[in-house]
Image: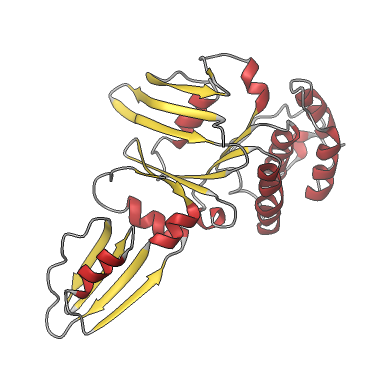
């Protein structure tokens, strides 16, 4: 599958603070990319660079084979963006804003906008200044989806939505966009929600991408292992891919990625009296990767 967007060696600092360092990844059409990282890791900075709002210090971003230039405008007609807090002209009515917004996008889908407004309970005649925060988030979703973008960037946009709306947005709107060929880069701290829609995972830590893998591969290869011993627990061996290990009074708990036969044999060599191995949720996998300790080497597909 051809690449829609490619990021190569991206770096960005603010004063002495280095936010992004040698960030590289690619996005393909029709896939949902879960983009995870602790608060302050640079997810919003990266989104703003992709949108041409701020310049990178190093590296390049290529969209549809053409480098993105700072402040360039034309390519933005093919990219949708939903931040956590959108700005609107409060004096406008919902339908006026959508008509105004649609004038900038050649592929604006007015029929889909009407359906989404109805499904989300947005009154086209309402003044934007009278909308609640959740309703403004819904309006931002409608505006971004109505542009029929080739790339949709979501920067933690669902935190102010009620549970049913979040569910409909994730299961309906996001998957429908991907099925139509849109690449979706979804940054969020609500990790469990990505489990429903993500095809691919990107994890940012210490300014670098430390995981770049298909979600199903990560789920199939990450394990938590619990071991019990008679007497004191032995020292944990040097097992490649150990994300977390904790030992106490005859018991060891560890998270390992990737899990394979060699890892299992190495652990059995500790001769535990009891051993349990279980799969992990996405949230547990994320915590395993970004827990205490330095940033880990990148794992790519």
Position of residue 66 in the picture relative to residue 56 (left or right): right
Q: Nearer the viewer, residue 124 or 5?
A: 5
Report the residue at 14% width, 76% height from top: 233
Task: State how many labels appear.
Answer: 0
Quarter of the picture containing the C terminus is: top left
Classify 206 as above or below 286: above
Q: Quadrant of residue 181?
A: top right
Residue 206, percent from left and from top: 31, 39
Residue nearer the viewer, 203 or 101: 203
Query: Where 214 sits versus 192, above or below?
Result: above
Instruction: Write down the quadrant of residue 288 in the picture.
Output: bottom left
Residue 264 in picture, x, y percent from top left:
27, 69
On screen, 87 above or below 73? below
| Viewer can see residue 92 | no
Q: Left or right: where does residue 237 sit relative to residue 114? A: left
184 and 293: which is toward the camera:
184
Residue found 78% across the figure and 26% down from its top: 102
178, 203: nearer the viewer = 178
- Is residue 52 visible from the viewing direction of this image? yes
* Display colour scheme: secondary structure
The answer to which quarter of the image holds residue 79 is top right
Q: Position of residue 155 (x, y in %)?
A: 55, 39
Q: In the rendered image, which quarter contains the N terminus? A: top right
Q: Residue at x 86, y 37 (%)?
A: 111
> How far across and down, in percent of the image, does residue 269 sit?
17, 74
* Residue displayed at 12% across by 73% down: 234
State left or right for residue 98 relative to residue 192. Answer: right
Q: As drawn, is 26 to the left or to the right of 210?
A: right
């Amino acid at each position: 599958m051809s690449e829609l967007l490619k990021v190569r060696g991206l770096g960005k600092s603010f004063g002495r603070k280095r936010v992004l360092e040698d960030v590289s990844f690619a996005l393909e059409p029709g896939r949902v990319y879960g983009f995870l990282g602790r608060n302050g890791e640079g997810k919003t900075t990266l989104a703003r660079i992709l949108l041409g709002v701020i310049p990178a210090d190093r590296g390049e971003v290529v969209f549809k084979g053409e480098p993105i230039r700072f402040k360039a405008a034309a390519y933005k007609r093919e990219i949708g963006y939903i931040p956590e807090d959108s700005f609107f002209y409060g004096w406008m009515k919902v339908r006026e804003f959508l008509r105004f917004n649609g004038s900038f996008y050649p592929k604006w889908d007015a029929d889909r906008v009407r359906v989404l407004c109805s499904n989300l309970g947005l009154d086209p005649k309402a003044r934007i200044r009278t909308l609640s925060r959740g309703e403004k988030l819904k309006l931002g979703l409608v505006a971004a989806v109505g542009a029929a973008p080739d790339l949709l960037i979501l920067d933690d946009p669902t935190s102010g939505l009620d549970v049913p709306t979040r569910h409909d947005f994730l299961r309906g709107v996001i998957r429908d966009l991907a099925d139509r060929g849109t690449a979706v880069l979804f940054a969020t701290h609500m990790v469990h929600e990505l489990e429903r829609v993500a095809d691919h995972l990107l994890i940012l830590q210490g300014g670098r991408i430390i995981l770049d893998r298909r979600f199903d591969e990560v789920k199939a290869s990450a394990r938590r292992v619990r071991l019990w011993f008679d007497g004191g627990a032995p020292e944990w061996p040097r097992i490649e891919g150990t994300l977390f290990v904790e030992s106490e009074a005859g018991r060891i708990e560890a998270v390992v990625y990737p899990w394979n036969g060699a890892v299992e044999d190495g652990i059995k060599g500790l001769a535990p009296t009891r051993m349990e191995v279980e799969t992990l949720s996405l949230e547990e996998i994320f915590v395993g990767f970004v827990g205490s300790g330095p940033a880990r080497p990148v794992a790519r597909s």
